[in-house]
Amino acid sequence: MIVFYYGAGRVPELAGYSRAVLQPEFYQPPELHRLRETGTEPLAYLSLSEDQGPPAPWQRPERNPDWGGAFVHVGHPGWRGHVLAQARAAIDAGFAGLFLDTLNVELTYPEDLPPLLELIAALRALPGSGYVLANRGFGLLPELAGHVDGILFESFSARWTAEGYGPWPPDVLEGHARVAEELPRYGLDLYALDYADSPGLADFARRRAALFGMECVISDRALSLV
C-alpha cells in the first residue's frame, strides 16, 4: 500500500504503509529513520517543471492557475542543478526514493520533453536514488520506463473541481482507459490517485483502477488524508 500525504507529522499512521510520498521540507532525519525502521519507504516529492520558489532565471512568465507555481525552462542549467540538489538533500536526509511530479509538459511545452527525460535520467543515476515513481509522464514513454520503477496515474477516474468532487466525463474516462491499457507492457508498478469525498465515488474509482491493474489511493485535493 502506498500513501500520498502532503502534510507534516503523522509518522505512526504513515508507518502502516509500504511507501509514503511526502514533502521533504516537512520531515527531519529522525522521523525518516523511524519510518524506515518500520519498513516504510519515504519518497521525496520533486517538481520537475514547476517552481514554487522565489523569482529565478529559469522561470517562465506563465504560472500554474491551480497552485500558483511558475512554469520553468526545464533545460536551463540552473533549474537542473536546483532539482538535483533538492534530490541529493532529500536522499542524504534519509528518504528512500523519489516521486517525480509535473511531468506532463507534452501539450504545453513539448520542446521541454528531451531535457525533462535527461533530468529524470540524472535523478535516477544519483547514488541512493532508490525507488523512483513518476506521476503520469505519458509523453515520455517508452523511454521513461527505463528510468523509473513505477507510474502513478493521478486523477484516473475522479477529480476535484471548483464545484466539488466527481467522476471525469465519459470521453475523458475513455481517453484515460486507452492510456492505461498500454501501461502494463512496461512491467512497472502501477498506481492510481483519485480524489473523492463520498463512499460511492471512492468505490467507483477503486473498482475502475482494479480493472486496469492499478492500486488505487483515494484522497482529497490537499492530499491531507492518511
Image: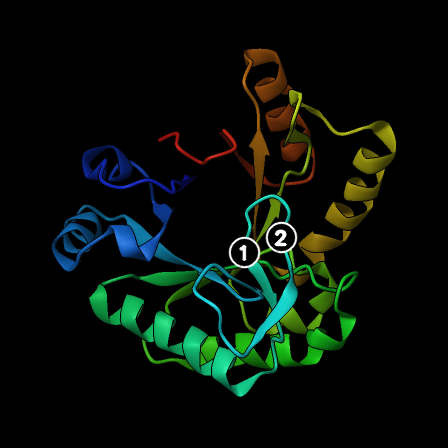
* Relative vertical location of residue 75 with respect to residue 12 in this rendering, above or below: below
Residues marked 2 and 1 touching at CB (< 8 Å): yes
Q: Say which quarter of the image contains residue 108.
A: bottom right
Dot 2 amino acid type:
Asn
**Image-based side of 205 in relation to 23, left or right:** right
Residue where numbered disc 2 is placed: 64
From what the image shows, is residue 200 above or below residue 122?
Answer: above
* Residue appearing at x 59%, y 27% in the figure: 206
Is 208 left or right of 70, judged from the image as shown?
A: right
Q: Residues within 10 Å of mark 1 (few under 14, many from 20)?
A: some
In front of the other: 215 or 60:
60
The amino acid pointed to by label 1 is Gly
| Residue 141 in view here | no
- Disc 1 is placed on an element classified as loop
Residue 20: give x, y in percent of width and height.
36, 46
**Image spot of residue 168 (x, y percent):** 75, 29
Q: Quadrant of the C terminus?
A: top left
The residue wearing badge 1 is: 69
Q: Residue at x 67, y 38 (%)?
A: 156
The reply, left or right, for residue 208 in relation to residue 151 is right
Q: How many marks?
A: 2
SS of the residue at dot 2?
A: loop
Categorize mark 2 by other alpha carbons within 10 Å: few (<14), some (14-19), many (20+). few
What mark, if any, has residue 141 been given in the picture? none
Seen from the viewer's position, the closer of residues 59 and 112 is 59
